[in-house]
Image (spheres, grey):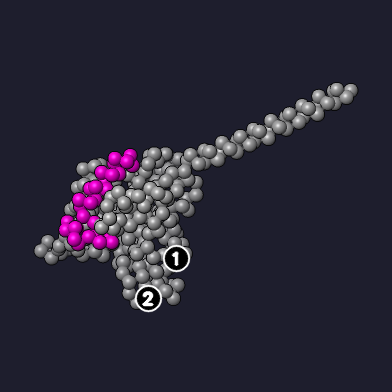
Amino acid sequence: MKTIVSRIVFAVISLFVCIVLVVTVSEDNKQVMSKAREVKLPVIMYHHMVKNEKMTGDYSISPDQFEKDLLYIKEKGYTTVSSDNILEFYYNNVPLPEKPIMITFDDGYESFYSYAFPLLKKYDMKAVVSLIGNYSDLYSNIPSSEKHINYSHITWDEAKIMQSSGLIEFGNHTYNLHSIINGRKGVIKYGDENFYNVGMKEDILKMQKKIEDKLGVTPYIFTYPFGARNEKSDEVIKDMGFKIILCCEEKVNILAGKDKGELYKINRFNRPGRISTQNFFKKIEKQ
């Protein structure tokens, strides 16, 4: 009798141990799979381009330096991705490339069209350009004699040409809020809560409508002017249907593909003009 009881006890204990082992292994596998799914996404933030390297600075880079960046990206095995690639990863479980990277240009200077776009075509790379609607309207409606590559902005016709390449997509950088004036910095207005639901919202919707009319697409990306944001502005932008928000904190993004809230704070590294390609990418790759 004791032998039978001992065997039963032994069997029960063995079964319990097996269950514990299976659960532990299963949890370990889940963690490994979760880690394997995580993707590092560095995002570079460019602004203006000038041919004269003496005129480069914190927010301007020469075309030659930009080409060196693209060559580095290619040689190191990175693949440029668009917002569609990222959304497919989050919404439809479509894998991202092994080493994704996103190139972004803020403000929509004409120098992007003249200098950066030909190089992106040359190396078959994608980029996101965040336009300021008021400036695109202005430079679409003045004669060429009143434009200059050092300060002009992309026209709607130029934007359409670039969009047709399949390499360039356009984000919303507000219609006319890219300024610091009367207690307002970009879309942040201190001491005026009503501004977010009225002035800010109206301006951003105006820009959405403008891009829809001129380019036939509705942008998913919103880019904060000056990187200025707060909880109220985030809330309004999310409610307006944007799926990705570009910010200015210099960190590599870790995308897990689960929490879509991660997409409302895409960090970016500002690309100054007076630093070598190798030194700039060192800052990114050490993270």
The residue positioned 43% from the left and 44% from the top of the image is 39
231, 142: nearer the viewer: 231
264, 157: nearer the viewer: 264
**Residue 72 falls inside the magenta stretch:** yes
Could you tell me which secondary element the residue under label 2 belongs to? loop
Q: Position of residue 76 (x, y in %)?
A: 32, 41
Q: Residue furthest left?
A: 145
Q: Which residue is mark 1?
A: 230
Residue 108 visible here: no
Q: Position of residue 120 (x, y in %)?
A: 24, 46
Q: Which residue is mark 2?
A: 183
Disc 1 versus disc 2: distance between alpha carbons? 15 Å
Quarter of the view holding residue 195:
bottom left
Quarter of the view holding residue 131:
bottom left
- Badge 1 crowding class, 10 Å Cα cut-off, few under 14, some 14 to 19, many 20 or more, is few
Q: Which mark is residue 25?
A: none
Q: Which badge, 1 or 2, comes first in the chain's sequence?
A: 2
Specify start and end residues of the magenta stretch as a single range. Answer: 50-78
* 93 sits left or right of 166 in the view: right
